[in-house]
Image: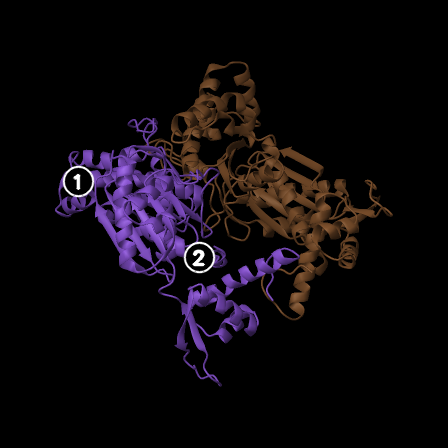
Chain colours: A purple, B brown
Amino acid sequence: MREPDGVRTGPASQQGMRRANLALVLDAIARAPRSRAEVAAETGLTRAAVSSLAERLIADGLVVEEGPTTSSGKVGRPGTALGLNPSGPGGLGAEIGVEHLGACVVDLRGEVRVRHRQEIRNRGREPAAVMLDLADLLRGAVAESGLRPAGLTLAVPGLVGASGGVLQRAANLGWEDVPLAAALRPALRAVGSPELAELPVEADNEANLGGLAELWLGGGPEHFLYVSAEAGVGSAIVVGGRLLRGARGYAGEFGHVPVRPDGPLCACGAHGCLEQYAGETAVLRAAGLADVRGDWVALLAERAGAGEQAVLAALAGAGSALGIAAAGAVNLLDPAEVVLGGGYARLEPWLLPAMRAELAARVTVRPWADERLRVSRLGRRGPLLGAAVGVVRAVLADPGRLGAA
Amino acid sequence: MREPDGVRTGPASQQGMRRANLALVLDAIARAPRSRAEVAAETGLTRAAVSSLAERLIADGLVVEEGPTTSSGKVGRPGTALGLNPSGPGGLGAEIGVEHLGACVVDLRGEVRVRHRQEIRNRGREPAAVMLDLADLLRGAVAESGLRPAGLTLAVPGLVGASGGVLQRAANLGWEDVPLAAALRPALRAVGSPELAELPVEADNEANLGGLAELWLGGGPEHFLYVSAEAGVGSAIVVGGRLLRGARGYAGEFGHVPVRPDGPLCACGAHGCLEQYAGETAVLRAAGLADVRGDWVALLAERAGAGEQAVLAALAGAGSALGIAAAGAVNLLDPAEVVLGGGYARLEPWLLPAMRAELAARVTVRPWADERLRVSRLGRRGPLLGAAVGVVRAVLADPGRLGAA
């Protein structure tokens, strides 16, 4: 019998062991459907223990019998393959962007069942009004998916830190100290989804969730810097396959790394922050498009594609500033890759050459290979996917939690 | 019986368990001397198992019987307290600096038994000649300590990375691709210490070892940035109580973070690196002391203490550049503290005000408290202490390794 680390005695230990073994069995099944005998062989648990644990996972709706396994040349009766239940509890992701809202439902296997993005200008709106629109989007997405979410994670363009879900500051929304779950729950009730209002709600910075999506779904290596740029410029630092959150949960504020210490004054009060060169406002101003509304990333891509000089120069300048700040981060962190995500992933042809030039010039002690800078194939979808997939990963990591509720 | 994580069968498992339990018992004794019964109560192992494991630790010279424990009001015969053997295997630390060599022997409890520092100008010398001097210093230190070292760790002012002990580049020494252990062993034999030449040798960057010393001995918190400045400017990043080494072992190159992207050309080929503002050469030049030899940190402290304007301005400039680069690192990493170590710790009165001003101005999204920047009380001794203590920590973490050899 597998024992969790540490010595415990009495009933607590029995429960803890069973809970750990539930996770062990579910993990084996999540990696690939397999028979009880195969699960026993893989985990080192007895066949009887696996059967008992599988019963529980089936009863909780996490696992289903998928039919006979392929015999694969082995002697004897084929077993019934156990697989993750595609109709089991899902993960509900939500996103509040400066110019959009998002909702996404994934199933236990992490497959996207429904994903909606609604373009809407949230800058300066009251949180309560935004939450009503978001609640409506979530209600529709969950109904369409047919799944019952096990939890809800909300991606926001600002600082959450270790605050327990308070959006402390989102400069581009104009929000400060918004208790996100407390603001979202009444909105969910108001749109007729009291059951969603009862879900556990977590919230995180969109760059953190985008970085986790890159790690889980985007092929991110063990160590990388994920740069998320759209209205603001943020980042997620992944070290040894884990998100680096820092002492107070504020790590990753890439947008406020000084690029030119005597540069323009930033909204944060400092001079020459990266956002003053690579943030939306700075780029649009440099491109002569300061009054643009709506999908400005798409517009920049279109104009740059058409060869408009001011736009090309603005993007080269932003790429250069991103590269200078990234060079500092690479010198500090030695990541295996720098991944550009968020809306800017779409601006790859114009941003990456300038970023590459700065990295090549400034990471010299150990040569920096060009291919170590790339864009995320998840692009803008990263944060919302990270939010939804994080919910089901938490279920898979501790399935005993569900049954105990 | 405590089982290590994971299921194993057969003899390997028995050996692995005994080895893990040896470490468990030794760890309990290392935290405070205690009787076999107390060790059993603390670890959850049986009294019989503890006795058998303690025999082995005593036979290996790691543990000694210290005499009867204080009865502390308990009923029954007092046990014999077991403690770490102060005459047991020691840790041997060595340091090659640009202007000095160092040797240090600590005992199993981490207490410094011998520490020698020799001022000597190593810049531009041949590695073989430096190694002979270092070997001589090490031989003397070990003889004086009366301990038998379990291993040797060498601190160097350059990049080692995951190279397996090759000093890839130390610009201030003028060394490249020096296989450190292979260079040191013949020197140890040449000075008549063949037994030291047989020790396992490890090597690491001096900033990494200084950061570890700060974590182990200097009261460093779980998350901090340790800045080590002397001839070069380096750093160690500690996250969750562990050193962040990066994908290839090159993390912490703080000296090459860009401070002013169009600034002076650095030896690394980039422009405006921190070292161009805060490294030895830059500070001495700014202070009008470009031709100084010997302990230039002491000289700067003396002249600054005397109120010499050019020196005060040079140090304020260096502090400001350190603060700009630290602000970027704090925005990225959210450490609980920034700790200034190395020789610059001695320049605290003149560097810290300028550093604090930049941090206050540039870490604004979450207020930065002045006291979160401090100097290391280990100062210059950090890297050498980290090297020596690391050796005994490795012994304590896996005492079975010794007996197996």
Residue A115 at least partly seen:
yes
Chain to which the residue tagged by mark 1 belongs: A
Mark nearer the viewer, 1 or 2: 2
Q: How many marks?
A: 2
In the displayed structure, would residue A10 be above or below residue B387?
A: below
Chain to which the residue tagged by mark 2 belongs: A
- Quadrant assignment for the N terminus of chain A: bottom right
Q: Which label belongs to residue A395?
A: 2
Residue B351 x, y percent position in the rendering:
49, 24
Q: Amino acid at mark 1?
A: Val
Residue A42 x, y percent position in the rendering:
51, 70
Q: Nearer the viewer, residue A122 or B5?
A: A122
Of all residues, the one furthest to the right in this rendering is: B77
Q: Quadrant of residue B324?
A: top left
Q: Nearer the viewer, residue A20 or B133?
A: A20
> Is B329 on the left-hand or right-hand side of B36?
left
Q: Amino acid at mark 2?
A: Val
Residue B167 x, y percent position in the rendering:
52, 47
Callout 1 touching callout 2 (CB < 8 Å): no
User: What residue appears at the point 39 percent right and 48 percent down from the top-left corner?
Assistant: A198
User: What residue appears at the point 53 percent right and 21 percent down from the top-left corner?
Assistant: B349
**How far apart in space, not on screen, are marks 1 and 2 (Cα)?**
46 Å
Q: Which element type, helix, strand or loop, lies under badge 2?
A: helix
Q: Earlier in the sequence, mark 1 or mark 2?
A: 1
> Is B78 on the left-hand or right-hand side of A125?
right
Same chain under badges 1 and 2? The reply is yes
Mark 1 packing: few (<14 Cα in 10 Å), some, or many (20+)? many
Residue A374 at least partly seen:
no
Q: Which label belongs to residue B42?
A: none
User: Label 1, on which residue?
Assistant: A311
Mark 2 packing: few (<14 Cα in 10 Å), some, or many (20+)? many
Q: Which element type, helix, strand or loop, lies under badge 1?
A: helix
